[in-house]
Amino acid sequence: MGEKLRLMRITQWFERTGPQVWQLGTAGIGFVLAAGNVFGGIHPFGMALVMGAGPNYLLSTTAGAMLGYFAFLPMVESLRYLAAIAVVLAGRMMFRDQFLPGAAAGCGTLIVVQLMLFTSGISGIPEAFSTLGACSLATGIGYALYRCGNRELHGAPLGMGTLLLYVSALPGLQQITLGPLMPGIILLAAGGLTLAYRGRMRDCLVFCVCGASVLTACDASLSFAGLAITAGCLAASYFTPGERMGSATMFLVGAIFGALSAPDSSLILGFLASCALGQAVFFAIPQRLLLMLPGQTDGSASQRPQVAGAVSQLESVANALTGIADTVNQVYNTLPKQGESYNWVIDYVAEELCRRCANRETCWVEGYTTTMDGFYRLKGVLEQYGRAALEQLPGQFCRCIHPTELCGCSSRGYALYRGRRESRVKAGAMRAALTEQYSAMAQALGQMAGQLGQSIAQDVGKTDRLSGLFASLGLEPLECQVGFDSTGRLRASITISRTPFQEDELLEITEEAQRMLHRPLSLPRVDHCRAVTTITFTEQPVFYPRFGLASRSAHEGACGDAVEQFCDCFGNAHLLLCDGMGVGRPAAIDGTLAATLAARLLKVGFCADSAARLVNVALSLKSDEESGATMDLVSVDLYTGRANLFKAGACPTFVIRGGKAHVLDGSSLPVGILEQVVGQQDSTNLHEGEWIVLVSDGVLLDGSGWLCQQLELCAACGNTPQETADIVADMARNRLGSQHPDDITVAVLSLERAVK
């Protein structure tokens, strides 16, 4: 709550002071632009900004530009530009929606003043041509800014106005002396590196070339600097997009080679120092702000509608399945319930037997209470024996003239009632299983739609290189996409004609792909679907899982505990332990079924909750006999070490951290025994060298104290996960004797550093 209030105060402060801050900022921009000069002495940028500024910032930019001209130019020169800006301001104020009057008035003022100076002999022909050049540049830049501000620059790249201001500020910054440092170089290097990091090669090229041209026009001796920065930024955008350190390295290499072409060795030190400071500015920008800048999109523009359509279809299917489940339940609850009570048996006898009886009026009108009391007494006989014999009829039916037929009819009616009741119970179980399955599938499809909808910043250069790799192997790609997700992790997917791969072939392809993509990669996931094969590469996780497993069955043969240990293609390691209820073959069937189904669902991206719900349905419909199994699942994100725990009737989980054993426990019920899963979810963080241990209930028959001590001892002795699992399983069996009443299973997962 305190954080929300603090953010609210900050937001309110920005709402109050934002306009003033922007006004000051535009005034500062005008001041810097007015200081810039190009081609040996013309200063068009301040006047251009006043020509093209938006109405809301016209006065502030004018004030900043006038102050800049007055501060940086000689008196006579500054008076000329001040007069021109004043006339431009007057024209803009009089003709608010038109660019030409203000621009023509300002340029006309400069030309008239220059003619006066020329006729008086104070200036000559070179100054006259300089004035014409200043008017031309000011008009061109001002018109571009004006059109960008009014969103009329059709066909221009995104951010053209920002690019113009950015580049126009370089000559002004060069006038600010900071010892050997060059502020214009710092700004150009930081901006070029930012675009290179996001892989925007075209925008980076335009930005660097424009900046280099302006710097050269400002000072011819800086032409080498523009060339060096352009080469370094282009190399970074092509070879190492999305990598801060890689982009900085490639940029520095280009800058060093470019510095060798400096016309004066005294400029090299200041240039390299400015480049280093520009890199420092680039590294100081927060990662989240860099990711807010759009990445390279040329290669993925055609894919977006397809991805958006697939996400929409998945969400529609999920909503439809949820709607079906809700509709089935609502219809069932609103339909009239027929044959729901024992009264249906009474109605059946009255309709089938008593309707044609001569004593019907006597029994059902005069003696209605006695007749109903007799039927309710007969209920106990029918429930106990399933049928009624003549000697078992209650005394209330002594007046009945058809006692034998009454026994037969009531027995048939009760048999029909019991059959309908059993059918109703089975139908209810099937309905509950069906609606639960629909709901679980809807939840899983919704999660997959969210994963598919995550934005991927495609890297065109890496995509082309990976596509070329497979083409060189004779596997012409049908589709190829390489990019970075919202967390900055590289993901690559390539689709080819159906092709089988051996493990050594995949290893060689992965090594070559690592060299081309400049990222460590895990072995790819290969999916075959009809006539195509999709190969998915993911960046190698930070951690590597090491598993250990030991199992001791209670009886010879089948073991009721089933364990699955695997890593999925999403960078998660899973440790799953399912314990079938009881021992022997029936328990083994339930445990293996639960573990196998859950593992398959987890591998394709289902979350623990959705997988447990579908396993619950499968166990409940497996047979007429009651089936159940505990479910103990640990899913570890190998990039961050975040561990998510899901328990359904399972034993406590043990975490070995810092040589000490910690117990994670909670109340839950096994899957397969209720219509819905009653599970518990928890989470914790694992670091390098820490363990997480799952055990079946056979290990804890003698308590958990000894287990914590033994796990701490194994950690202190440096035992591997497999050695620890064997030691604990053998000790549990020895403590309970040779005839231990339950299966014993120990599963251990530890994390090791994979990327140094």
Image: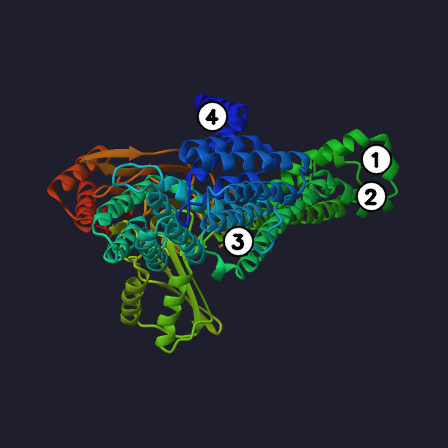
Disc 4 marks which residue? 7
Amino acid type at mark 2: Cys
Disc 2 marks which residue? 354
Please identify the residue farthest to the front as the structure is shown: 120
Look at 45% across and 55% down and name the residue there.
203
Disc 3 marks which residue? 157
Residues under numbered marks 2 and 4 in contact, where contact means CB atoms less than 8 Å apart: no
As measured in the structure, the alpha-carbon distance from the residue carrying label 2 to the one carrying label 4 is 81 Å
Depth check, mark 2 against mark 4: the one in front is 4
Residues under numbered marks 4 and 1 in contact, where contact means CB atoms less than 8 Å apart: no
Residue 664 locus on image (x, y percent): 32, 34
Q: In the image shown, does 709 or 427 lie closer to the viewer?
A: 709
Amino acid type at mark 1: Trp
Q: Residues within 10 Å of mark 4 (few under 14, many from 20)?
A: few
Residues under numbered marks 1 and 2 in contact, where contact means CB atoms less than 8 Å apart: yes
Disc 1 marks which residue? 364
Image quadrant assignment for residue 668:
top left
